[in-house]
């Protein structure tokens, strides 16, 4: 489904994880997504970088992007499994 969206639409996709999630850690999500995107030859656009709200030093997590920023995996610092509940 996601590969079809990446190849045939301009829809931007975001997968995110709280970095304090004990049940589905961001490392498990990375272990599933990163190799899959590589085998599907989705080009890496930008490797891991911090993301901020103030554009400077208030790091809220980390993000990695593929295919001209069309697909992103983002971590949310200090959040657990239900991200909106922990970090709204």
Image: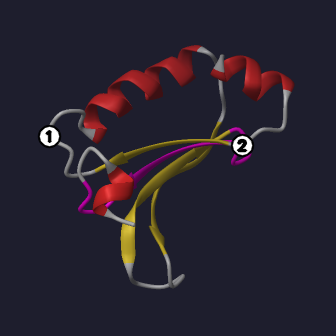
Residue that protrudes farthest toward the left in the picture = 22
Q: For the point 85% across and 23% down, which residue is it? A: 8
Q: Is residue 43 above or below residue 57?
A: above
| Relative side of 79 to 74, left or right | left
Query: Which residues lie in the magenta part?
Result: 67-79
Label number found at residue 74: none
Q: For the point 23% across and 62% down, which residue is it? A: 78
Q: In this view, does 11 lie above or below 9?
A: below
- Give the class, few, some or many, for how many residues have Cα within 10 Å of label 1's Cα (few <14, many ≥20): few
Quadrant of residue 66 within the rendered picture: top right
**Mark 2 secondary-structure assignment:** loop
Image location (x, y in percent) of residue 54: 51, 85
Image location (x, y in percent) of residue 16: 44, 45
Quadrant of residue 40 within the rendered picture: top right
Q: Mark 1 points at which residue?
A: 22
| Relative side of 41 to 35, left or right | right
Quadrant of residue 24 within the rendered picture: top left
Residues 23 and 55: in front is 23
- Give the class, few, some or many, for how many residues have Cα within 10 Å of label 2's Cα (few <14, many ≥20): few
Residues 56 and 54: in front is 54
Q: Mark 2 points at which residue?
A: 12
Image location (x, y in percent) of residue 33: 45, 26
Q: For the point 23% across and 51% down, which residue is it? A: 80
């Amino acid at each position: 489904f996601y590969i079809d969206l990446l190849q045939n639409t301009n829809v931007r996709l975001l997968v995110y994880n709280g970095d304090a999630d004990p049940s589905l850690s961001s490392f498990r999500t990375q272990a599933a997504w990163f190799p899959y995107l590589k085998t599907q030859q989705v080009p890496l656009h930008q490797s891991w970088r911090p993301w901020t709200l103030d554009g400077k030093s208030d790091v809220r997590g980390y993000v990695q992007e593929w295919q001209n920023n069309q697909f992103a995996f983002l971590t949310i610092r200090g959040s657990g499994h239900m991200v909106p509940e922990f970090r709204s």
